[in-house]
Structures are given as structure tokens and as C-alpha cells.
Image (cartoon, grey):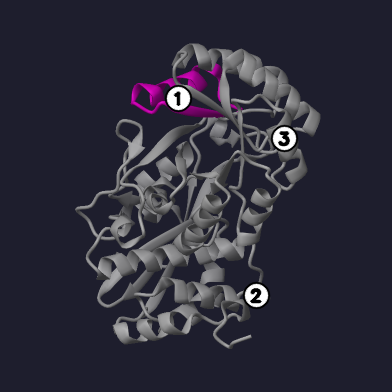
């Protein structure tokens, strides 16, 4: 096996040499983290298996060639320290126009520290920052630097937490429909006996035409999930059932896909961190639609690989959350289905950034008048939420 084989932690020689010739290098990484409280009842939100009171963004700012690039992940604050200790030393000094080369170096460097989970999330934040830096050095919007298939990304409104009272639940989902988003999702299965009333209220509020999605976050057993899949489809015309069972239960997902209602798509993949996670879901024929999160799956470089897998298996891909990034990144997904326009992330991104994309007619359309992602950090607004890093800006 060659020394430059990526499987050995090396990098493609021709790409590395081109990066060296480009001149611009990554000079330094700044790492910050901000924790924003949720706006749910009593300061909490819940889904089928988890309750939380805040969302933490780990933000990476890459400097090089007189420009900066921005990337982030939604993770524990420990991911910020991971970037500083394990990733910055192998990225700094590398070619700023070759993010995939540095992506290989990062994953090689964290072999013993742990690739799945926080390791992949830390890599994702840096990788996105490097792609943003490259696009800004090229003075082009990121979507034009990527091998894009689309100029816009369809979205679905997502929130509908299990602890929302009916009034807030229906107002949130109906509000998205009123703004032109034709598909909405609510969380289910924490207390399955309460779901019929919740679903009926939502369906009445949004009307018959919009697509209604559900997400159990892996809360159900296989037989419970099959029972509810049939009820969801027959009684409320639900078209999407996300993680009816744990995403680790590929046989259970396959059972739901094979035995469930024909118009109800089974989806999973948001917890995919490395390529093998997605290969296993696709190889087991466990999903009708694969999901991927650009802030978890290795960033844009990782997303490009996942998109190729999905296309090769003739399965659509849906983006998970982080709309300020995903509105650009998902344009490079050939078999794109849509993107989750998630309430918590929309709040955080609008709080911390200028230049955030807003949906129009049910899609996010990248701004081609600005280089890179088109984002600018609102440092003064972000400062009260800082949990890591020094003040800047």
C-alpha cells in the first residue's frame, strides 16, 4: 500500500502538491463556543428520548491569505478543546485551497482519540471553515465553489417538541405553512397515548394539503413502531417517520420499511459520523430516505462522500439541521430531498450571525452576491453566551 494512500492516513499526492503551489496557507484557527438557552416551556424542550435546556455551538474561524472562513458544529463545549488540541496543529500551515487534503490529515490525527461522535463533529466544524475560507479566497459563493447540482434547497419546518402545549404546537407548525413551507414535522412517542390528540390538532391547523412528518427519536420498539406507523399514515396522512426505532437497529428500520404503509417513508442517518455509518444503513436497505448532518458527518468533504453513496444506492438524501450551512452545502447533493429547518438552530444562527438564509416559497436559496457562506459573526450579540474562547471582533 502506497504511503500516500488515504487508508494509511496519507493524502492524494497530486492534490497535496497543488495545495502547496497555491501559496495561501491556513495561518491559525480561532475556536469559540456559545451556549444559548432554549425558549421552550419552563426553559426546556423534549423529544421522544431526550430533554434539554440549551444548545451549544462550537464555532471555528480559519485565517489565511488575508481572509477568514467560518464553520461550526452543534456539540458539547469539549469539542472546542478537541479542535485546539488535535486538529489545529495538523491544519495550520496547510494549503488553504485544498480542504480535502486537510480533512485527511485531521481524520488521520484523531485515529486514537476517536473518530465517531465528538471527533467527527470537531472535524466537521473545521472542514466547513476551510471550505468557507477557500470560497472567500476565490471571491465566490460557496455553492459555486462546490460541484453543485441545485441552486436552492427545499426545507421542512421542524420543532413541535413533545412538551409544547397544543396551542404552541399548532401555532408553530401552522406558522411555517403560512410562510410557504409545505411540509412540517413534530416530535412524537415520548407519551404515545397523547400523540393522537396532538396529531389531530396539527392536521386541523395546517389543513389537508401540507405534508406532515413525525420523528420518534428512536423511542419505540419494533412492534410499537409498526403499530404507530399504520395509524400515522391512515389517520393523519403522515408521510415521513424518522427514527421510529433506534438508528442502531438497522433490522428494525428495515422491518418498518418493508412492512409499513407504502406512502410512509422511513428515515434515519442524522447520527452518522463516519462513512461506514451510512454504508451500513444503505447496505441493510434500512431507509427510504437517508439523512446526513453536515456538522456531524465530516463537514462538506464528508457530505460529498455521503451524497455519492446515496446516489449509488438510488436513495434520496435529506439534510439534518444547521440551515445557515446546509443551504449552501446541500446544493452539491445530487439526490437531494430536502433540509430540516430546525427551530433551535434557526434561533441560534439568527442570534449569532448576519447573512443567515431565510426560506422563500419553501426553499433556501444561497446568496450569490456574497463570498463563501455569506455569514458574519455578530460578536457583541454572541458574547453573553460565550462558554469557551476569548472575546474578539
* Residue at x 66%, y 24% (from the top left corner): 261
Disc 3 or disc 1, which is closer to the eye? 3
Q: Give x and y (percent) for residue 214.
A: 59, 29
Label 1 SS: helix
- The picture places residue 76, in percent across and down from the top left corner, at 58, 57
Q: Which residues make up the magenta segment? A: 162-186
Q: Which mark is residue 294?
A: none
* Picture quadrant where residue 6 is located: bottom right
Q: Any magenta on residue 174?
A: yes
How far apart, in angstroms, are the residues tagged by discs 3 and 1?
23 Å
Q: SS at mark 3?
A: loop
Residue at which label 3 appears: 219
Mark 2, secondary structure of its residue: loop
Query: With 133 as the anchor, is 171 left or right in this view?
Result: right
Mark 2–mark 1 distance (CA, rounded to whole Å): 43 Å
For residue 111, which numbered disc appears in the image? 2
Residue 139 versus residue 324 in the image, above or below:
below
Question: How would you rate the neighbour count of disc 3 (Cα within 10 Å): few for under 14, some for 14-19, many for 20 or more?
Answer: many
Q: Position of residue 301 (x, y in %)?
A: 47, 64
| Sequence-first tag of 2 and 1 | 2
Taking the spot 55% from the left edge, 44% from the top edge, the residue there is 315
- For the point 30% across and 81% down, the residue is 24
Position in image of residue 72 (x %, y %)? 45, 58
- The residue closer to the viewer here, 78 or 43, is 78
Within the magenta stretch, is there residue 179? yes
Instruction: Report the residue at 45% width, 33% height from top.
Output: 156
Instruction: Tell me, for residue 172, which label it has, or none.
Output: 1
**In this view of the protein, can residue 58 be seen by the observer?**
no
Amino acid at each position: 500500500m502506497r504511503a500516500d494512500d488515504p487508508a494509511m492516513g496519507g493524502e492524494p499526492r497530486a492534490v497535496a502538491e497543488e495545495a502547496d503551489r497555491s501559496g495561501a496557507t491556513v495561518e491559525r484557527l480561532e475556536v469559540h463556543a456559545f451556549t444559548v438557552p432554549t425558549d421552550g416551556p419552563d426553559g426546556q424542550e423534549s423529544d421522544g428520548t431526550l430533554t434539554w435546556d440549551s444548545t451549544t455551538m462550537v464555532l471555528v474561524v480559519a485565517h489565511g491569505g488575508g481572509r477568514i472562513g467560518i464553520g461550526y458544529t452543534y456539540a458539547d463545549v469539549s469539542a472546542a478543546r478537541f479542535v485546539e488540541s488535535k486538529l489545529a496543529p495538523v491544519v495550520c500551515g496547510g494549503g488553504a485551497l485544498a480542504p480535502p487534503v486537510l480533512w485527511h490529515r485531521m481524520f488521520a490525527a484523531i485515529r486514537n482519540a476517536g473518530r465517531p461522535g465528538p471527533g467527527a463533529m470537531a472535524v466537521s466544524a473545521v472542514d466547513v471553515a476551510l471550505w468557507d475560507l477557500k470560497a472567500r479566497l476565490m471571491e465566490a459563493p460557496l455553492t459555486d465553489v462546490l460541484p453543485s447540482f441545485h441552486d436552492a434547497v427545499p426545507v421542512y419546518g421542524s420543532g413541535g417538541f413533545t412538551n409544547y402545549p397544543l396551542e404552541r404546537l399548532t401555532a408553530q407548525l401552522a406558522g411555517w405553512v403560512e410562510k410557504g413551507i409545505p411540509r412540517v414535522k413534530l416530535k412524537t412517542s415520548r407519551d404515545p397515548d397523547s400523540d393522537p390528540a396532538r396529531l389531530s390538532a396539527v392536521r386541523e391547523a395546517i389543513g389537508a394539503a401540507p405534508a406532515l412528518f413525525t420523528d420518534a427519536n428512536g423511542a419505540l420498539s419494533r412492534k410499537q413502531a409498526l403499530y404507530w406507523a399504520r395509524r400515522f399514515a391512515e389517520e393523519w396522512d403522515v408521510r415521513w417517520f424518522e427514527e421510529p426505532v433506534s438508528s442502531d437497529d438497522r433490522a428494525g428500520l428495515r422491518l418498518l420499511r418493508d412492512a409499513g404503509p407504502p406512502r410512509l417513508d422511513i428515515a434515519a442517518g442524522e447520527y452518522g459520523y463516519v462513512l461506514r455509518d451510512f454504508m451500513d444503513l444503505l447496505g441493510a436497505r434500512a431507509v427510504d430516505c437517508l439523512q446526513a448532518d453536515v456538522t456531524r458527518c465530516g463537514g462538506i468533504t464528508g457530505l460529498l462522500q455521503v451524497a455519492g453513496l446515496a446516489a449509488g444506492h438510488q436513495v434520496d438524501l435529506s439534510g439534518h439541521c444547521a440551515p445557515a450551512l446546509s443551504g449552501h452545502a446541500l446544493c452539491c447533493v445530487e439526490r437531494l430531498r430536502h433540509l430540516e429547518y430546525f427551530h433551535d438552530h434557526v434561533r441560534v444562527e439568527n442570534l449569532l450571525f448576519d447573512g443567515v438564509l431565510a426560506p422563500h416559497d419553501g426553499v433556501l436559496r444561497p446568496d450569490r452576491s456574497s463570498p463563501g457562506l455569506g455569514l458574519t459573526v455578530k460578536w457583541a450579540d454572541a458574547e453573553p453566551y460565550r462558554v469557551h474562547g476569548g472575546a474578539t471582533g
